[in-house]
Amino acid sequence: DVKVTQSSRYLVKRTGEKVFLECVQDMDHENMFWYRQDPGLGLRLIYFSYDVKMKEKGDIPEGYSVSREKKERFSLILESASTNQTSMYLCASSFMRGGQPQHFGDGTRLSIL
Amino acid sequence: ILNVEQSPQSLHVQEGDSTNFTCSFPSSNFYALHWYRWETAKSPEALFVMTLNGDEKKKGRISATLNTKEGYSYLYIKGSQPEDSATYLCAFLSGTYKYIFGTGTRLKVLA
């Protein structure tokens, strides 16, 4: 079974802190994604990566950056956390071939105080 | 801006009832449509990957159909059970790696 592991289920940080959310997958997937889920909105894509050191902006990249130094690991960085970044963050991975299903982690519920 | 809409937003049914939900998506530049089930405190799980107009997929009591020309997909659950309670998400892919997710249909099956 594919395993996508997010480093924390719950995280509380303060405004202005630099926050790292880590995601690791064990299926050698080329694609990795970061989404956020807010009430009343669908999953919104923050960033995705289709290869090591490659990244593409999603729909809401402002205030975030990402790092993919190894194929299995994709990190989301909140450069200076703000209260409007309080949300559920989901990581996903998939094979490169178009249309393949995404496999999701359990999510990180992040609160910025 | 591409928009994916799901209806209804939420649904309560009795155990044993059959039900269906709709996912509407742009009818141009279609590449694939996915259905996911997202149970509380778990991660979303892929149900179906649909790529061809007229596709019908089935997994146990759950099935899905696809009409790419008019831009909709239906998800059906036959004989709903309490364990079917979840949020059902659809995601539209238009030939890039960017999936556009709907807001989901929240299903509650009452015993």
Image: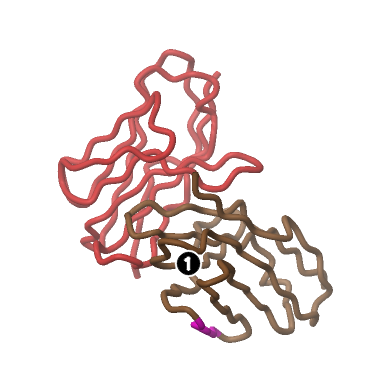
Chain colours: A red, B brown
Camera-nearest residue between A101 and B5? B5
Tell me where residue A57 appears, x and y as whole percent.
32, 37
Residues packed near mark 1 inside 10 Å, few (<14), some (14 to 19) or many (20 plus)? many
Residue beneath the point at 72% across and 63% down: B107
Query: Against A64, is B57 above or below?
Result: below
Quadrant of the image for the N terminus of chain A?
Answer: bottom left
Camera-nearest residue between A13 and B2? B2
Mark 1: which amino acid?
His
The mark tally for this picture is 1
Camera-nearest residue between B59 and B56? B56
In magenta stretch: residue B58: yes
Quadrant of the image for the C terminus of chain A?
Answer: top right
Asked which quadrant contains residue A30, the reply is bottom left
Query: Against B92, is A67 above or below?
Result: above
**Label 1 residue SS:** strand
Q: In this rendering, would A113 be left or right of A68?
A: right
Tell me where residue A47 appears, x and y as whole percent.
34, 40
Tell me where residue B48 appears, x and y as whole percent.
48, 74
In magenta stretch: residue A41: no
Tell me where residue A110 appears, x and y as whole percent.
50, 32
Q: In this rendering, would A9 be left or right of A57?
A: right
Chain letter of the residue carrying label 1: B
List the single residue furthest toward the top.
Answer: A16
Residue, disc 1: B34
Report the predominant secondary structure element of the magenta stretch: strand
Asked which quadrant contains residue B60, the reply is bottom right
Residue beneath the point at 57% across and 70% down: B70
Query: Against A65, is B57 above or below?
Result: below
Residue beneath the point at 81% across and 70% down: B13
Residue beneath the point at 75% across and 58% down: B10
Q: Which residues are magenta?
A: B54-59
